[in-house]
Amino acid sequence: MENGAAKPVIVAIDGPSGTGKSSTSKAVAAQLGLSYLDTGAQYRAITWWMVTNGIDTADPSAIAAAAAKPEILSGTDPANPTITVDGVDVAGPIREQDVTAKVSAVSAVPEVRARITELQRAIAASAVTGIVVEGRDIGTTVLPDADLKIFLTASPEARAARRSGELKGADLHTTREALIKRDAADSSRKTSPLAKAGDAVEVDTTELTLQQVVECVVTLVEEKRAGK
Ligand SMILES: Nc1ncnc2c1ncn2[C@@H]1O[C@H](COP(=O)(O)OP(=O)(O)O)[C@@H](O)[C@H]1O
Ligand SMILES: Nc1ccn([C@H]2C[C@H](O)[C@@H](COP(=O)(O)OP(=O)(O)O)O2)c(=O)n1
């Protein structure tokens, strides 16, 4: 017989763009009855606010001065993840090209990272059954005590093909170059760069279907829960 409620399980999924973090995290969370947090959406939301409010995103001091202003709320149901800024639903606008081009510069500013990291920790701490949190620095910085850390990778070709499929036929070469440039910026910033935690399990998804990746992560979570 169960002795009280199970301890919440915290899963961190990091990796570069197009490796399958969002799709995998949502499916794993749904399958295991956990909450889900897309931390990239939070960085995109604060970037959207900066752009909308005329803040120069090439000026780190202007970004730092405004970092505390927007109120960013994330809905963590994996079947219906939501993101609002000052009460406005920004799920669509945060995926636009302009935000994508500026998000690395905004998310490199330490004041932005401190603000968003605090939000992320509060959301994770309040998840009753547990949560799958996906991003770039979750296993290294945001939740270093996560029960399970996964680092997803895939070849640049596979990642670009997946992304240009989403962008309805966008040029493969341009998509590949933009993706490599963003990963380089995210990996080389001073504060909390994209990095694999020493204790993360690396999964190369190049030759795997999404379903295979999900099965792999679900198995790893179940093994952790069983104390293996
Ligand atoms: N293993 C996979 N094989 C093929 N396509 C995938 C795989 N994983 C994800 N995808 C697709 O690739 C695209 C990018 O995936 P996404 O989960 O948004 O990646 P990330 O969050 O790492 O940027 C989506 O269209 C998704 O359906
Ligand atoms: N934990 C995180 C998550 C995202 N970011 C930044 C860096 C990324 O280029 C952007 C956008 O992240 P997002 O996960 O939406 O990117 P994708 O286009 O899905 O690859 O946010 C970050 O700095 N730290």
Image (cartoon, rainbow, N blue to C red):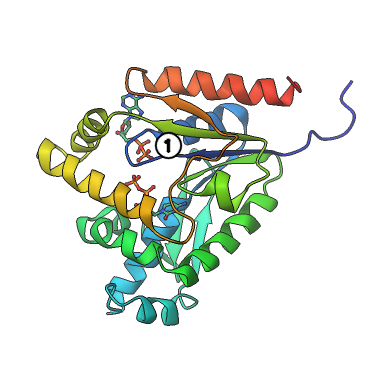
Amino acid type, callout 1: Lys
Q: Counting other residues with Cα less than 10 Å from the Cα at mark 1, is it few (<14), some (14-19), or many (20 or more)?
A: many
Q: Where does label 1 land, which residue?
A: 21
Where residue 80 sits: x, y (%)?
Answer: 47, 43
Q: Left or right: where does residue 35 sit relative to residue 170?
A: right
Relative to the observer, which residue lies in front, 137 or 77?
137
- Residue 108, picture quadrant: bottom left
Please report the residue visible at 54 percent of the width from the left and 47 percent of the height from the top. 138
Asked whether mark 1 lies closer than 8 Å to ligand 1, one says yes
Picture quadrant where residue 10 is located:
top right
Number of numbered discs present? Answer: 1
| Image quarter of the N terminus | top right
Where residue 62 appears, as percent x and y from the top left, is: 36, 81
Residue 23: horizontal and vertical position, in percent? 41, 33
- Image location (x, y in percent) of residue 178: 20, 48
Residue at 57 percent across and 56 percent down: it is 120
Residue at 65% across / 41% down in the picture? 146
Reply above or below: 64 against 14: below
Say which of 139 and 29 sits in front.
139
Q: Relative to residue 54, is residue 213 drawn left or right? A: right
Q: In front here: 153 or 126? A: 153
Q: Can residue 43 be seen in this view?
A: yes
The quadrant where ligand 1 appears is top left
The quarter of the rendered structure image containing the C terminus is: top right
| Residue at 57% over, 52% down | 141
